[in-house]
Image (cartoon, rainbow, N blue to C red):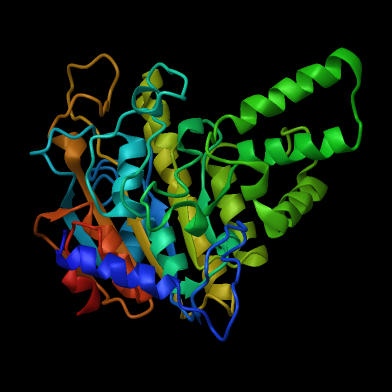
Amino acid sequence: MNTSPTALVSRRRFVGDLTVAGSGLLLAGSSGSPLLAASKQAYKGPNVILIRFGGGARRRESIDPRHTHTPFTCHELVRRGVLYSRMEIDQLLDLNTSHGEGTLNLITGCYEKYRDIGETRADASRKLLGARFEAQVPTLFEYLRASFDVPDHQALIVNGEDRGDEEFYNFSNHHLFGVSYRSQTLSLRRYKGWLLREQLAEHKWDGKALLEKQAELRKLEDIDYRATKETGQGAEIATFWANWRRYYGESGLVNPRGDRLLTELALRAIKELQPRLMMINYHDCDYVHWGYFSHYTRALSIMDDGIKQIVAAVGNNPEYRDNTVFAIVPDCGRDDNPFMNVPCQHHFNSRAAHEIFALFFGRGIARGQVVDRRTQQISVARTLAQCMGFSAEHAKGPVLPEVFS
């Protein structure tokens, strides 16, 4: 029998989840899973906004004042919080320094050598260069919802439209957590799926056009191979998309695109859904793979402007003002090799691709502190868990103590 502290904590959580307030059986969460629900406390805060400074962002163009393309983050926000200027992705484990892995490192607190589900599940199709990963340990979203009375529409991942493989990082396959504690995703793909279902219900097409649209919907739904109609996005997210439709229409030619789209989704989510934990997965930096360094630097400035808008929105919202913690962390770094035909790669396991940073600021966070020691990306999860008042017992990274000093 496993009698490790982690195993004992997990068993206590399992017993806790079987505690019933009063008598009778209750359904747990909006997923409708037939679980006995614990009597959970309402979550009081702080709200947490985790920003994946994504698509691979180097320290030089981000936090170096002499070369930065992110002036608001570098000059304003660093003064408000704690900057870990030498955070890394572990170089000893031969880890892939890429976007999906970096995302899961941040929300699980563990390094894993992920493989696409086409390689790990007999019932999943093969996909070239697939990054459909399943976490083995719980995510921050699962810990939060298992610990507090937080509905799934207030545990949000905001994703880019061209990162389909990352559309279902909503829950792990851990046997004590999983789908009952899932987060929800806001993305243009999710909107397109919702819109197609609405249009089909409105009988907008018939004949060959109807068959084509039905096939298009199946393709969109297949992205999240674990989703079912019963575990869909729920009424609150449906209302969110209905409001989006009324404002931006159906063409896709009016709403923002790229990382500006993620900023807009996040701003509207703060106003309409009031998430307690939200991860924004910026990604436009990755367009540097097309070969133009300006794609990378321009993307950095777009992220910086988006962060500025989100910080302002939080300051103007009484539900968030003085009750929010931000964490800004890249998913990975980028190579610094002047002999490469395409600048700033990140797939060759170079030292620079492992070099990132982390910036924390907000309620209860120390101000104006730069920590110049080596830290690990997986420490972000346990640190945010402590901010929010729950234990990320399966996370491997230690808490970053300077955040609380």
Q: Compared with residue 156, is residue 272 higher up or lower down, i.e. above or below?
A: below
Q: Which residue is drawn at 58% across and 83% down?
A: 23
Residue 309 in sight in this render? no
Q: Position of residue 77 (x, y in %)?
A: 35, 64
Q: Indicate the quadrant containing the N terminus: top left, top right, bottom left or bottom right.
A: bottom left
Q: Please indicate whether residue 219 sits to the left or right of residue 14 in the image.
A: right
Q: Which of 117 and 259 is in front in this view?
A: 117
Total labels drawn: 0
Q: Nearer the viewer, residue 5 or 158?
A: 5
Q: Please indicate whether residue 26 sits to the left or right of residue 246 in the image.
A: left
Q: Residue at x 30, y 18 (%)?
A: 342
Q: Residue furthest bottom?
A: 22
Residue 220 in sight in this render? yes
Q: Nearer the viewer, residue 331 or 357?
A: 331
Q: Compared with residue 233, is residue 164 higher up or lower down, i.e. above or below?
A: above
Q: Please indicate whether residue 317 sits to the left or right of residue 104 in the image.
A: right
Q: Where is residue 18 in the image (x, y as percent from the top left)?
A: 45, 72
Q: Position of residue 369 (x, y in %)?
A: 20, 71
Q: Where is residue 321 in the image (x, y as percent from the top left)?
A: 51, 78
Residue 334 position by quadrant: top left
Q: Compared with residue 105, is residue 134 higher up or lower down, i.e. above or below?
A: above
Q: Please indicate whether residue 70 sits to the left or right of residue 184 in the image.
A: left
Q: Residue at x 34, y 23 (%)?
A: 119
Q: Indicate the quadrant containing the C terminus: top left, top right, bottom left or bottom right.
A: bottom left
